[in-house]
Image (cartoon, rainbow, N blue to C red):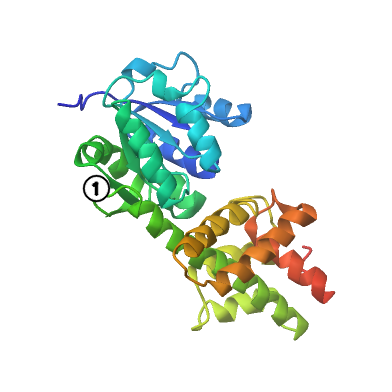
Amino acid sequence: MHDKKNKNVLVIGLGSMGYGIAQSLIRSGYKVFGEDKNPIQQNRLIEEGGFDKNIPYEDLRAVIIVVLNEKQTRDIIFGQDGISEKLKKDTLIMVCTTVSPDFAKEIASSCYNKGLLYLDAPISGGAKKSAEGKLSYMVSGSKKAFEVAKPILDDTSETVFEFGEHVGSGSAMKAVNQMLAGVHIAAMAEAITFGITQGIDPKRFLEVISKCAGTSWMLENRAPHIVDNDYSPKSSINIWPKDLGIVLDIAKNSNFSAPLTAAALQQFISAAGSGLGLEDDAAVAKIYARNAGIKLPQN
């Protein structure tokens, strides 16, 4: 039986999503250790009751990984000084990073060979819902892994969608979500800047479209960033070349044509190439504005 009283959890990757998970777990009474390349984030965690020193690898209930990409995820688990060599048998590795289904299967198999549990657990909901403990998870993995993860999922989520024991199914679902999310952000940016060329103020655009059939969750969440001229990154431009790249790789391997996804990807690549990579992903509108010779709100 797993030690249900073990409340030691390590969160690796304290960006907006990982930090929100860590916050939620601290509120729920876990002893949360955090690691991030940014010392500011680690210090914030300590101020809120977390820890970043003397990590008890031999006595962790779970390691939650919320980093940028597959390479970082692999290095954390199996790289030099990787956690797989430090954890005791049946410790849970819960990967929330957006990865391909094939990558999830490969890492899960390698974890299994080392006696570790693996849960494919991509997330959605944004920074605000993460901080509120209201994420949506798309999970796949063994019953044993899910059993260990369940209290953690319950304490950090609003909804948990289970995709069975076939690892990679959760990541496949996340790819579908990211396809829509990326296309919707690009479409919002295209529409709001098109409106400007027609003399429609962005604030008016948001007021009207949010009550019309053309709206989307992404439009209602991201268009205010453009209206307010606030591009501090809640979710950065740099995420999308990676995530939509994963979507298109999966599509290519399935002989599936995804032209709308490809068009959206090009806009995010243009934005990243123009030095906007660390800005909020709503900044993709700046590419449309530049190409059309128009100005976005400057307030």
| Extreme residue toward the left, this view | 1
- For the point 56% across and 30% down, the residue is 36
Give the image quarter of residue 77.
top left
Give the image quarter of residue 112.
top left
| Extreme residue toward the top, this view | 54
Q: Is residue 118 above or below residue 235?
A: above
Residue to which mark 1 is pinned: 165
- For the point 36% across and 20% down, the residue is 87
The amino acid on which the numbered mark 1 sits, given as a three-letter code, is Glu
- For the point 35% across and 43% down, the residue is 156
Q: Nearer the viewer, residue 120 or 49?
A: 120
Which percent across, then down, holds residue 217? 49, 68
Q: Is residue 45 above or below residue 121?
A: above
Which percent across, then down, holds residue 295? 81, 70
Q: Nearer the viewer, residue 206 or 215?
A: 215
Q: Nearer the viewer, residue 116 or 148?
A: 116
Side (left or right) of 171 relative to 196 = left
User: SS class of the residue under badge 1?
Assistant: loop
- For the point 37% across and 46% down, the residue is 121
Give the image quarter of residue 200.
bottom right
| Quadrant of the frame with the N terminus | top left
Side (left or right) of 84 relative to 91 = right
Q: Is residue 229 visible?
A: no
Side (left or right) of 6 relative to 126 = left
Which percent across, then down, holds residue 96? 43, 44
Specify few, some or many for label 1: CA neighbours under 10 Å numbering under 14, 14-19, or 20 or more: some
Which percent across, then down, holds residue 48? 48, 29
| Extreme residue toward the right, this view | 293
Q: Is residue 224 visible?
A: yes
| Quadrant of the frame with the C terminus | bottom right
